[in-house]
């Protein structure tokens, strides 16, 4: 089969890690008899510099016309003081929204080879963890009304969180179905003791649970969830939560795996065309130095094969290769507690993964 993949390399380490994932996809193509055709599109800071907008129309059109999108990362200090409409992140939120990608899947598991790198206590590490965060991606406070105004105490800023019944129902459906395919346990995380959006969220989750009697649904307040993730991560199977809570909890989950450089993500909507990106940022401090960890992006490419193209064997081959290089003790510099061995750079880590495929 031939697949057309849109590449958004973005800023910082984006180009290096996307190139690594492209090399891996090409190798998979050779081994399994597929062709992947890649087309580059601009987004983020580089698009602001080149086209004067973080999300050029050609990028949206090109992504829509492709079979899927692979994204590196956007942002950097150069654009940090820009007005809201000219920030790199605006491009990322814009493409998620334009492609209707309301589901963000962020798996986080502890590799047995990385138990030494996990910052948690040995008895917690021993139990391991393997969880999937289902983050709502096109609603909530990220997309609510915001601005500046004159308030009771003078000038103020505001952001609003809104969730419609429809938005909660559709993410609930994905979460219950994801739980059905895994350990059949779903934890809905909210702040229902304070927020009205959370109370609606909880109400709908419970109503939907009636359609999925085989899934055990529980609720947890987000502050408690932040604590439970480091106290006993093995209690979680599938987590479903709002856009902002999912953003925060997925960074926390990544850290207990040993590094944020390991976590992939899939952003999905109702069509086959998804957007796949590492959960980490553009790491401008190490950009262009061949120090970045390509694993999160390579695993994101594996998720693309699995979720958008239905190529499970091919995805398994990539995941097994990553597993084997970690088992062999190979580490990039970001992986916590890296041993006395010199860490590998982005290219060398990619070479090792290619050799293992
Ligand atoms: C993420 C990132 C983005 C988000 C930023 C860059 C806008 O942190 O994908 O987790 O908050 O969604
Ligand atoms: Mg984030």
Image (tube, rainbow, N blue to C red):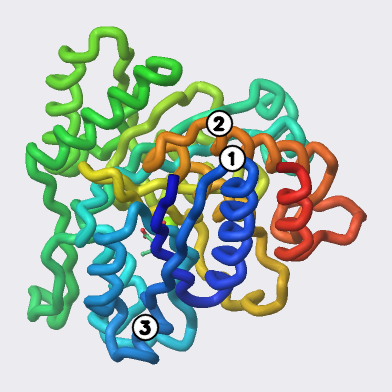
Crowd tier of the residue under label 1, counting other residues whose Cα lies within 10 Å: few below 14, some 14–19, many 20 or above? few
Pointers 2 and 1 in contact (C-beta within 8 Å)? yes
Please tell me how crowded label 2 is: few (under 14), some (14-19), or many (20+) other residues with Cα within 10 Å: few
SS category of the residue bearing label 2: helix
Q: Which residue matches tag 3?
A: 47
Q: The residue tagged with tag 3: helix, strand or loop?
A: helix
SS at mark 1 in the image: helix
- Give me the residue at 88% from left, 61% from top: 342
Residue drawn where x is 27% and y is 64% of the image: 95
- Disc nearest the viewer among 2 and 1: 1
Tell which tag, 1 or 3, sits nearer the viewer.
1
| Measured Cα–Cα span from mark 1 to mark 3 | 35 Å
In the displayed structure, 310 sits above or below 260; it is above
The residue that disc 2 covers is 313
Query: x and y percent of residue 130 in the render?
Result: 55, 28
Residue 228, visible in the rendered structure: no
Give ligand 1's quarter of the image.
Answer: bottom left
């Amino acid at each position: 089969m031939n697949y057309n993949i849109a590449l958004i390399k973005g800023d910082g380490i984006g180009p290096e890690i996307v190139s690594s994932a492209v090399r891996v996809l090409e190798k998979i193509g050779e081994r399994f008899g597929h062709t992947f055709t890649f087309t580059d599109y601009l987004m983020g800071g580089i698009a602001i510099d080149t086209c004067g907008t973080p999300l050029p129309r050609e990028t949206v059109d090109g992504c829509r016309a492709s079979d899927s999108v692979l994204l590196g990362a956007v942002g950097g200090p150069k654009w940090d003081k820009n007005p809201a409409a000219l920030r790199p992140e605006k491009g990322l939120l814009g493409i998620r929204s334009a492609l209707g990608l309301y589901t963000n899947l962020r798996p986080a598991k502890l590799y047995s080879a990385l138990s030494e790198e996990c910052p948690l206590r040995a008895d917690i590490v021993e139990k391991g963890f393997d969880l999937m965060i289902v983050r709502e991606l096109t609603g909530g406070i990220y997309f609510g009304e915001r601005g500046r105004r004159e308030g009771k105490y003078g000038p103020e800023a505001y952001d609003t969180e809104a969730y419609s019944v429809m938005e909660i129902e559709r993410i609930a459906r994905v979460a219950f179905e994801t739980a059905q395919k895994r350990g059949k346990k779903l934890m809905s995380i909210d702040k229902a003791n304070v927020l009205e959006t959370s109370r609606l969220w909880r109400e709908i989750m419970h109503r939907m649970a009636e359609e999925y009697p085989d899934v055990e649904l529980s609720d947890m307040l987000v502050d408690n969830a932040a604590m439970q993730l480091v106290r006993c991560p093995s209690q979680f199977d599938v987590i479903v939560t709002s856009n902002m809570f999912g953003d925060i909890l997925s960074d926390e989950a990544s850290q207990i795996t040993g590094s944020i450089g390991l976590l992939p993500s899939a952003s999905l909507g109702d069509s086959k065309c998804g957007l796949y990106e590492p959960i980490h940022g553009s790491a401008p401090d190490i950009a262009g130095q061949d120090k970045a960890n390509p694993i999160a992006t390579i695993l994101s490419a594996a998720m693309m094969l699995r979720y958008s193209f239905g190529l499970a064997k091919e995805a398994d081959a990539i995941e097994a290769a990553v597993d084997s290089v970690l088992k062999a003790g190979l580490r990039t510099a970001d992986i916590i507690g890296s041993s006395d061995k010199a860490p590998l750079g982005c290219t060398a880590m990619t070479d090792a993964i290619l050799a293992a495929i």
